[in-house]
Image (tube, grey):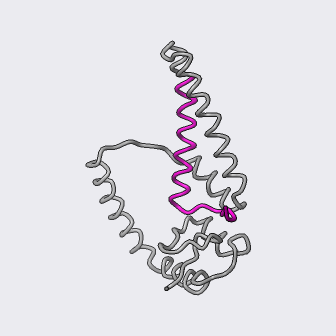
């Protein structure tokens, strides 16, 4: 196995947030359902094991993250929540978000143009590791989405024109 990345792209961060919320939910079920005698010993044991092993994996992943990525992930935990919706509601939400994002982009066009220039001149075909890059730290701090394309294993903002 090759060297593990020390950062998370957006999808990986969301997946890890789901794991954290799953662990929290398993713990809550054991406590609340257990108080009402609504779990067998075997069910309770299974949920406790899921929590234990989930935490073990989560902690292991978090330990290898660089300081900036770790801070971003832990900040995400504080504000993240899970909401289950049917497809119709999700599609309506996506349309609303697209409209709001388009509006936000228009209002902040100069800011995004600056970010795109920074990314173009600093991140395109970059060979640095994210730990060595001040731009990476600022992009993470301001939740700048990574470009779609290649992941070189060193930085989520790396991309190439090829």
Horizontal side of 92 relative to 140 (left or right) equals left
Write down the quadrant of residue 128 in the picture.
bottom right
Please identify the dominant SS of the magenta region: helix
* Residue 119 spot, x, y in % from top left: 56, 80
Residue toward you, 136 or 43 = 43
Residue 148 lies, with reference to residue 50, above or below; the image says: below
Tell me residue 71's x, y (percent).
Answer: 67, 56
With respect to residue 117, does 105 lie above or below? above
- Return the x and y of residue 120 as percentages of the image width and height: 54, 84
Residue at (39%, 74%) from the top-left corner? 106
Image quadrant of residue 2? bottom right
Nearer to the camera, 91 or 52: 52
- In the foreground, 133 or 19: 19
Q: Quadrant of the N terminus?
A: bottom right
34 in relation to 57, above or below: above
Position in image of residue 76 (x %, y %): 57, 52
Q: Which residues are magenta?
A: 1-30
């Amino acid at each position: 196995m090759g060297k593990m990345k020390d950062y998370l792209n957006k999808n990986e961060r969301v997946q890890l947030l789901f794991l954290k919320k799953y662990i929290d939910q398993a713990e809550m079920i054991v406590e609340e359902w257990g108080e009402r005698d609504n779990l067998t010993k075997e069910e309770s044991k299974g949920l406790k094991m899921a929590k234990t092993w989930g935490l073990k994996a989560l902690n292991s992943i978090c330990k290898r993250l660089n300081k900036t990525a770790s801070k971003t992930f832990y900040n995400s935990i504080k504000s993240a929540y899970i909401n289950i919706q049917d497809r119709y509601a999700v599609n309506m939400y996506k349309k609303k978000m697209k409209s709001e994002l388009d509006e936000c982009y228009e209002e902040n066009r100069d800011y995004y143009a600056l970010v795109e220039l920074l990314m173009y001149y600093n991140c395109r075909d970059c060979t640095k590791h994210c730990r060595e890059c001040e731009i990476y730290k600022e992009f993470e701090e301001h939740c700048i989405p990574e470009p779609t394309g290649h992941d070189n294993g060193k930085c989520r903002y790396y991309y190439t024109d090829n």
